Image: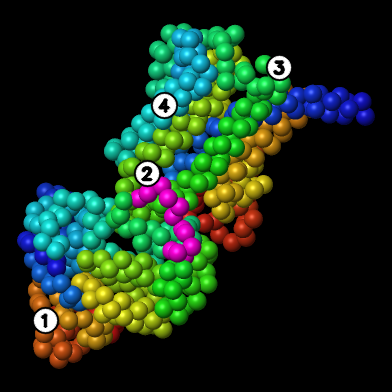
Amino acid sequence: MDTIYTVISNFIALVPVTLAQSLILSFIVLGIMLPFRTLNFPDLTSEGAFPLGGCVCALSLAGGAPGWLAILAAMAAGFLAGSCTAFVHLRFRIHTLLAGILMMTMLYSINLRLMGKSNLSVYGTPTIFDGIPFVEPGFPVSKIVVAGLLGIAVYCLLNLYFRTERGTAMRAVGSNPDMAEAQGISIWAATIGGVGLAGAFSATSGALMVQSQGFADVNMGIGTLINGLAALMIGEAIVGKQTIRRQLAAPFVGAIVYYQLVSLCLAAGMPPTDLKLATGLFVLAMLALPTLKRSRGPMPAREAIRE
Amino acid sequence: MLEIRSARKVFYKGQPDEKIALNDLSLTLPTGNFAIVIGSNGAGKSSMLNAISGALMLDSGKILINGDDVTALPVHKRASRVARVFQDPMKGTAASMTVAENMLLAELRGKKLSLNRGLNAKRLASYRERLAALNLGLENRLETRVELLSGGQRQSLSLIMATCDQPDLLLLDEHTAALDPRTADIVMQATVRAVEAFNLTTLMVTHNMQHAVDFGHSVVMLDAGRTRLEITGAEKAEVTIPKLIGHFGLKTDRMLLAS
């Protein structure tokens, strides 16, 4: 009884910190969801765009830029990374996943070059989390407020965008590229723009993380992709993905729930080193679930296997 | 008006399995003309349609639509002039999007896209009206995702989408071949209605000889990548299935079976 009590009290004590962290990381989940679900472009760039955003943000902060400007600089860098992946795929007909791996690998060196060393401390520089009235700076509440408001703003803007003529066209490219092209929609413009936008969101996540933790590290991206994917699966299981509104809400809801679950597992005494195995198994289970449901009958033909 | 001038396309050039898809094919289709394209498998019908729509770039030759040279334009730049309905009902619609969204994409074909709201009340009302003309009940399913419709419904939707904006050129690629006879009939009637109502310049590829006899102002027969025969005017009015099949030679059992 005592152990359960300790686990729960440990978990509850961590809820605000975890919430702040999950809101910051919800942007990378958004950056994974956008190409995957709206453009049918499974993309791995985010694992490189996240630290890229962090590095660019840290450099900007170290150079004296205010927090919001550092985030804008990170977004621009992330957009460039995402659009490069899309270009490599479109121009050289390289599979989207391979294009993403190439970009992610090259970004590691680029990040190192940018910072000149493997990590950069920006502790004490002013951040976007300062200046929230009535809240002590540095306390998780300010991070929750800032990241939460940013998340709500991005959610609303994307929701509006995907209902405009251009947004509808972008979704058509993901749904049926041949048909979209026959309707006069440029596949290149939609893919480069869409994957670029996703890269910008992943980089935003990295920039917010750097401002939150006070340092950037070239290795900060490792594992973010699988965590993001797990969060996305949870989000889609909870809110669904039938409409644009639900599909866009899934990354945010998923990130919040997923990181609380991780925190609960850690509070219950799971060794942190096992976390990746557990996350991997979880994503695998979520992807495998639909095939287990129709286990009767022969295995589907290879061509029929999707997702 | 569509003009194809000595269009040539060779696949696997210089390799043992070299295939001449279009062998200096020339064809002129006057404005408002509804032509039926027939020919055995591999005669170059699909290659011709792909070349016109821009999905296939020519090795040499020219394609002009209403006098403008479109030979070098990619698919999305020809979209404002050319509309196409495919044989496969899945191809012409965006499956995971709703009926209304598909109609919107068709209405915006080839236009400059804005950041205004796509589906407004005015547009929805006009879509409802257009779909009601089909008598398939689609007007009440505007919010349904297209993947939940039957093949016939999807193909009818593709047709409405292709004709709604009165394209300079309508390409129909065996668009009733994958449908059951009754649905094929509905789609074919809707096709004729639309083509006549807007006086559309139309190319319809078909393996159905009855359709070739019943519909259109002219019949074009392709063979080995070139036009072998053009039947127009009074001669077209008197054409019969046996006469058409006579032109094919003996190798085309599929024609007989299909008729």
Figure check: B118 above or below A101 = below
- Which numbered marker is on residue A99? none
* Residue designated by label 1: B231
Dot 4 falls on a residue whose secondary structure is helix
Q: Are marks 3 and 1 in contact (CB under 8 Å)?
A: no
Q: Which residues are magenta?
A: B113-124
- Residue wearing tag 2: A190
* Real-space CA distance between mark 3 and mark 1, rounded to the nearest whole angstrom: 86 Å
Task: Same chain for labels 3 and 1? Say yes or no.
Answer: no
Residue farthest to the right, as pictured: A1
Q: State the image coordinates of residue B109 (x, y, percent, origin top left).
A: 32, 58
Separation (CA) of disc 4 from disc 1: 61 Å
Which residue has dot 4 on it? Answer: A76
Tag 4–tag 2 contact (CB < 8 Å): no
Three-letter amino acid code at the position of disc 4 = Ala
- 10 Å crowding of disc 4: few (<14), some (14-19), many (20+): many
Give neighbour class at mark 1: few <14, some 14-19, many 20+ (Cα, 10 Å).
some
Q: Is residue B29 visible?
A: yes
